Image (cartoon, rainbow, N blue to C red):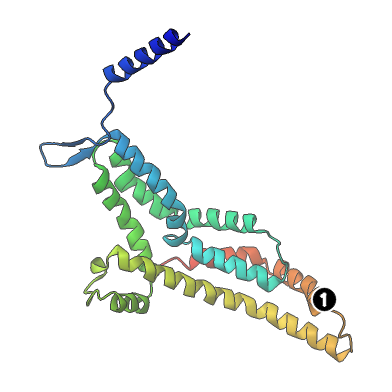
Amino acid sequence: MRAGVLLIGLLLSLGLQAAPGVEAVTVTQDAGGVQTYTLSIQVLLFMTALSLIPGALMMMTSFARIIIVLAILRQALGTQSTPNNQILVGIALFLTIFIMMPVFKEVNTVAIQPYLEDRLTTMPALQAAAQPVREFMLAQTREDDLAMFARIGNYGELQSPADVPFSLLLPAFATSELKTGFQIGFLLFIPFLVIDVVVASVLMSMGMMMLSPMIISLPFKIMLFVLIDGWALVFGTLASSFQV
């Protein structure tokens, strides 16, 4: 029995010695001076990038503005958890895809397809893909937000949009999206707040202080929202707010 175990261990050790390991990093350089990494490193970088996609989707697209407006709208209606978080995120996701489709198509044309056809290597493809996204973010970013972060980060005076680095554009774009989302949400909140005030005043004048105004105002707010085709108006306003 022991001899069999030793024999198996010997065979395994010989097999491991005979089979050389795969090199973790292999860098080749072509005649033009472009470096290409081994496939295992490319796969590792790709898997690492996948973990950053949710953050990029939320903070580099129209997703943040949309989900903020939808959350404030639900709060204004007073429907508690209806629609629930999964539905709101799904609506925001598909509306984001609709709004960002021109940008995605341009990224596919200038970066993804040339990379798949081996006309671009990894880094030039990433730089080409970043340009349409950069133009979209610049169009939606306020100049005062850019100036504030440029002053905080000591970026100096920016002569043109081409001088704005991504490290400056990202926080400025996120701040602008938060501002715009809350502004739209505020405008949506006002009509429903008026209904709540009117209902509360009527109940107080009738001496019905023990009855919650939210119970009475909720049907009226839902009826108003349905009669004016509120979802279509909200989605149309959000989509048009990204047009330059």
- Picture layout, residue 79 above or below residue 197: above
Coordinates of residue 188 in the picture (x, y in percent): 61, 75
Q: Amino acid at mark 1?
A: Ile
> Which of these two is toward me, 47 or 5?
5
- Picture layout, residue 221 above or below residue 24: below
Q: Quadrant of the C terminus?
A: bottom left
> Which of these two is toward me, 95 or 167?
167
> Looking at the image, which residue is at 52% across and 71% down?
181
Q: Residue furthest left?
A: 31
Q: Residue furthest front?
A: 2
Number of residue marks: 1
Q: Residue furthest right?
A: 207
- Picture layout, residue 141 above or below residue 56: below
Coordinates of residue 75 in the picture (x, y in percent): 66, 71
SS class of the residue under badge 1?
A: helix
Residue 236 visible in the picture:
no
Coordinates of residue 193 in the picture (x, y in percent): 69, 80
> Looking at the image, which residue is at 42% across and 52% down?
52
- Picture layout, residue 83 above or below residue 152: above
How many neighbours does mark 1 have within 10 angstroms: few (below 14), some (14-19), or many (20 or more)?
some
Q: Which residue is mark 1?
A: 216
Quarter residue 229 falls in: bottom right
Residue 95 visible in the picture:
yes
> Looking at the image, which residue is at 74% across and 69% down?
222
Position of 191 with respect to 14 (left or right) is right
Coordinates of residue 142 in the picture (x, y in percent): 38, 75
